[in-house]
Amino acid sequence: MTKGLWELVLQGVWTTVQLLVLSALLATAVSFVVGVARTHRLWIVRFVAGFYTEVFRGTSALVMIFWVFFVLPPAFGWQLVPMWAGTLALGLTYGAYGSEIVRGALNAVDPAQREGGIALSFTPWQRMRLIMLPQAVPEMIPSFCNLLIELLKGTALVSVMGMGDLAFSGNLVRLALQESAEIYTYVLLIYFVIAFALTRLMRGLEKRLKRGVGKDLLNEAGAREAKRAETTGVGAAGGGVA
Amino acid sequence: MKWDWGAVRDFMPHFWDGLLVTLQALALGSLISFALGLVWALLMRTPSRWVRWPVGAVTEFVRDTPLLVQLFFLFYVLPEWGLTFSALTTGVFAIGLHYSTYTMQVYRAGIEAVPAGQWEAATALNLPWRRTWTAVILPQAVRRVVPALGNYVISMLKDTPLLMAITVLEMLGQARLFSQQHFQFTEPLTVIGVAFILVSYLASLLLRALERRLVR
């Protein structure tokens, strides 16, 4: 591999990282808004949020990407820059998965905590912000970590639309060299390294957040090991599609 | 927004072809992932760390890298090594391999959930190693993990469109072909989007019925 080709790969890495960060931010926002809405006391809010989750979880991320790239422009007259189109499709899809994590963690908070908030006449918003979320968020981190890895793997899908991410630059190098084993091995290794770094990062974040609510991670290492097989990320989080 | 029912009617024959390929890939991919996942899970329980460590590393690697790149790898690299398969076979194998690293975790949890008393009883009855697994542990473990495995079948369904990238004409591939020939993108893509939601919803209903029967 020549130096020029390596530069191509590095550009691909940069695009992948940008897309990952942007769509992770959008997905986090969507999952908190939708996840909190699913615990709302009005049934219509719960229904709309649930409908959103089912639709976006039910369809494939790649079909979503095709839809945003090809159907939105003629149907609504919106032509998005590829980066934003990719961010939108991935953020909305993975946000739907994330909303299930948020809902599950909110439901898992001890009911006495909520009742305590009511007894102290906190407003619903204060209750959510000061009591529920600080306890629920650290519990979400391992599941969100898995989802982040799924999102990283999902970013490769935009290469099908011709966006110059890591998988796409891998294809270009294959065409240039007429040889595929080497470049695809490198591409897979780069993805793995990114995933590994993300896992470490999330583990550190979890440790800090748990300390914030007075929980020691050391005691829970065993519990997390036992939990890992259940927190399955895409498709399996929350049990089934419907 | 223009919606042309004529285009939908023209697309339907292609849609059924695509659906058939999607379901084929899904069924075969599930079988491979169930079988391979069990193999990984059993290998991870062998006492030798020379088996456990490589299996753990390889499956972790496969799980953390994109299926799309794995598809490209198998599709372009295997022919260089003199192994030529059809695109569909390659795709089915890639999906099966990718998801086997997930089902392996599911099996592991299921095996660990079998109470220790069952193991001790098998030892006390002097059951040979093979009978312990096939007659005591696995029937209890597999029964518990069916719902979790079913969730992965639904995830797999949503990953079958990736096969389009290696020229398999499944639902999305058919939709793209049709759109490019007739220059109508809205209708075929929306039809398959709805089809995915319907199929995964039906699958989840089926799964719930199965869950009620098996897990009591």
Image (cartoon, grey):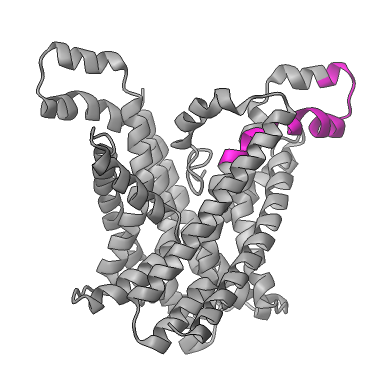
* Quarter holding residue B77: bottom left
Q: Is residue A228 left or right of residue A10?
A: left
Give the dominant element type of the magenta stretch: helix, strand or loop: helix
The image position of residue A54, as x and y in percent, is 57, 49
The residue drawn where x is 57% and y is 39% is A142
Give the position of the N terminus of chain B as an image quadrant.
bottom right
Residue A118 belongs to magenta span: yes
Relative to B37, say whether A193 is above or below.
Answer: below
Q: Nearer the viewer, residue A101 or B186?
A: A101
* Quarter holding residue B135: top left
The residue drawn where x is 51% and y is 31% is A224
Specify whether residue B153 is in view: yes
The image position of residue B187, as x and y in percent, is 54, 75
The image position of residue B74, as x and y in percent, is 31, 69
The residue drawn where x is 82% and y is 34% is A129
Per the rendered image, the range of residues in magenta is A117-142
Q: Is residue B51 left or right of residue B215?
A: left
Q: Nearer the viewer, residue B216 or B87?
A: B87
Q: Is residue B172 left or right of residue A146?
A: left
Relative to B202, say whether B196 is above or below.
Answer: below
The residue drawn where x is 30% and y is 50% is B33
Q: Nearer the viewer, residue A105 or A192?
A: A192
Q: Say how many tags the image has.
A: 0
Residue A123 belongs to magenta span: yes
Give the position of the C terminus of chain B as an image quadrant.
top left
The image position of residue B71, as x and y in percent, is 36, 68
Specify whether residue B5 is in view: no
Q: Looking at the image, which residue sits at the far front?
A: A3
